[in-house]
Amino acid sequence: MVVKDIKYAIGVDIGGSHIAAAVVDVQYRKIIPETKVHSKLDSHEDAGIILRVWLECIKQSIKKSEGLPIGGVGISIPGPADYDKGIVHIQGVDKYDKLFAINMRHFLTNELAGLLLYPDNVFFINDAAGFLLGETWSQYLTEEKITAITLGTGIGSGFMKDGLLLSDDDTIPDHGELFNLPYQSKTVEDWISTRWFLHRYKEQCGYEAANVKEIADQAATDSNTRMIFEEFGSNLGTVLSPVLAKFGTDLLILGGNISKSYPLFKATFEEELGEVTPRIHFAKETENAAILGAVKNILAMNEMDFNKRNTAQFLMPVNREEKQLEGYDVFPSFEISEGTVSQGFESLARELSSYKKVCIDGYVGVDWDYLMGGLSEALRQLGVKNITYSIDAAYKDADVIDAMIAPFLGGDDPVFGRLYEGDLEDFFQRDKLESLVADDDCLSIVYGSGASLCNWDAKLVYVDIPKNEIQYRSRAGWVRNIGAQKSISAKPQYKRMFFVDWPVLNRHKQNLLSAIDFVVDGQFLNDISWCAGSTLRAALAEMSTHAFRARPWFEPGVWGGDWIKNNIDGLSDEVVNYAWSFELIVPENGIVISKKGVNLEVSFDFLMYNDHQAILGDAAKTFGTDFPIRFDFLDTFNGENLSLQCHPKPNFISEQFGEKFTQDETYYILDAADDANVYLGFKEGVNKDEFHQALVKSQQEGKEVEVEKYVQTHPAKKHDLFLIPHGTIHCSGINNLVLEISSTPYIYTFKMYDWMRLDLNGQPRPLNIERGMANLNFDCQGDVVEEEYISKQTVTAEGKGWKVVQLSTHPQHFYEVYRMEFNDQIHVEGNNQCHILSLVEGSKVEVVTGDRKMVVAYAETFVIPSNAGSYTINNLGSSIAKVVKSFVKPEVCNYES
């Protein structure tokens, strides 16, 4: 939401024993004095009591404004906290412990509904940062580099450069915080704080003081007391001198009650600062500055771009009218027989309203702020008071998590890491989990990835989200990895998701499946769909006995073409090309169930976790819950060649990346132009060292490689099959639509030459020459290529109007490929195997499994699970139908890996 016309807003300053709120006139950057309200509070009270004190203080200030249009509420509050989301992380500091993990933003947004022009315009800021922002804004301070220090109960700090607050910069301490830096065998706050003054005063004078002001009053006439301030000034200067020097501070703002005694420690403080002493500005009212800064933060947040998806692709509709499409369906769904699929927050809120505790777990990439805000508001509309707790507050510190997962991220490697072997519990701090205590006076909801680990006796909701939508949100900077405090750029984030987050969350999802009470589709931007866990499990069982399609998705790429654009309706035209279609890449595809037009998507993994035996049949023992085969399209029509590449040997992919089986591929040519070709295998007599040197020289000097000097090219025609077991040098040439029929691993491509081009973002694509050379099979050269790497097609069965053609695969492939050609109908025995199929010629067929029928259009991929048994395919078109099928070779089945 972008709100530009805010004339008045509430600013709030929260301290350890008080709260102050006032209306701010945005135009004049001033507090309206008659609206200022102070309330005392006990920070040791239960969460509900504390939140009610806050709420009442804000409401009183609004009431005193006498009808002014209040555009939002900004709150300055001490940390630690997730300020973007409004979640308290304070724990073990003897104040506000009962607020740990509570989403204050949801609470206040709901409770202040009807009192604000923009009800969701509630934002939080660190109290020291709020002080800095408010003082610079209200006093029109414009220096380039400004540091703010508050001296009170402890030491607060903030940094600003060119008008922007900094929290993550090489020139400032971590998170802009000084209090926890080491100093004289302790921390800075042990020496720069009220408690230091009180302790030092008792040590120096032999009796106790009530506060620092009492000590300051004595210092005017007592040299011993004055020495305490001189010592404080020396410590403060010693701490700040390197900090100010490194940042290059132009202006130092001092605030807090202790700063009022500056004349008593000025000399020793400035002596320690020496040449780095900047201009010093004293804030008259620290509290007022924090209130003003909280309001300025509202304005800043409203100027931010909150686009959550960086893609031109259409979002799947939550509700879809029944209609028969003529061609390829980009949003296929499976109409379930049992249960219902519901739409909207209100219906879910009604379902949950009768419970006292609810746990909402889910996948990385879910927009928890939107989801929980919508649910919390729907509950409020029903008159159900609720408090939401974020499980994120229970994560281990980010630097601890970073160190834990570093061995799995491949260092500087831009693409590859190693699959993380631990569990989701590894990311959480046990004592923090145990601090998540539900409020007995209302509905308590704990949410986030791993929420079920808090072990509440609660109803369990699981929120899933498709992998493509996760990546679109990642590219928009909207996703945080597990345990991360901020988002990172899309490519390193994908690597961390692929090798750490997804394996961890998949194991967690598998463990939860049988206990899920409700499941929610979290991909929609303005809605949700959901169903009961029992409905999901029944749907998965039903799908396991019938034909179904996974929900495909499509991506542009540097070599992409226009076949998909020209032949598949329902896709965005606002892309340069389409390079890939994820037809069936199980780790990144979802399945959509529907009832009466309402769609709900969950990951394909759920099918495997529910009953992998029913899906895979005889292959289940070998592959477990890993689906073994993938189908995807590579489109180079009027595009470019793929990169010259190979895939890793089995022991290499296992030892280096932690995968169970390798990326053996085939290229089935679904369509091709007359000049299409495929690069495959070496020419006779190619020298390994010479080829290696040519690749390295090209990379170092930017020179083209004469690829055809080393690599064979083969004409590509419709229905050809090229065999690409691991270690085979290969790539598709232009003007092909390749149906990759391959083993499931899909990112382990060692690009060795990329035709001297940049990616769609203008950056070089990473090459893996050395890994490629370590895996290349140089026996794949000369006549061997034609004999062993180009499939031979043999008719193995035929009858009236039909025949079955076997397309030979390489001995290294663990799967078979057949093509069924028929004029009217063909009946197929499943033989206790899962079949993966695609209509590669013909307009439309009807697939019959048991009592269900499914229409499949040209180029669509579909799955027949083992438990479906035999099936029939009827040709609905006017010309011959050709269907490719693949399944695991019988000799590979029933082998426990």
Image (cartoon, rainbow, N blue to C red):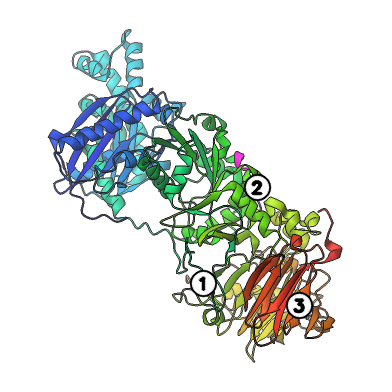
Most foreground residue, 280 or 176: 176
Residue 891: image quadrant is bottom right
- Residue 510's disc number: 2
Most foreground residue, 309 or 396: 309
Residue 804: image quadrant is bottom right
How crowded pointer 1 is (Cα within 10 Å; few <14, some 14-19, many 20+) is rated as: few
The mark tally for this picture is 3
Residue 684 lies left or right of residue 161; in this view the side is right
Residue 260 lies left or right of residue 413; in this view the side is left
Q: Earlier in the sequence, mark 1 or mark 2?
A: 1
Given the image, on which type of amino acid does mark 1 rest? Lys
Residue underneath mark 3: 826
**Residue 541's x, y, as percent?**
68, 54
Q: In the structure shown, which secondary structural element does the residue marked by tag 1 occupy?
A: loop
For the C terminus, which image quadrant? bottom right
How crowded pointer 3 is (Cα within 10 Å; few <14, some 14-19, many 20+) is rated as: many
Q: Examine the residues drawn in magenta and state their main secondary structure.
A: loop
- Residue 323's disc number: 1
Given the image, on which type of amino acid does mark 3 rest? Ile
Q: Residue at horizontal 24%, vertical 38%?
A: 291
**Separation of residues labelled 3 and 1 (CA atoms):** 27 Å
Q: Residue at horizontal 34%, vertical 28%?
A: 50
Most foreground residue, 429 or 318: 318
In the rendered structure, does residue 668 fall within the stretch colored magenta?
Answer: no
Range drawn in magenta? 418-425
User: Farthest right residue?
Assistant: 891
**Residue 160's x, y, as percent?**
30, 46
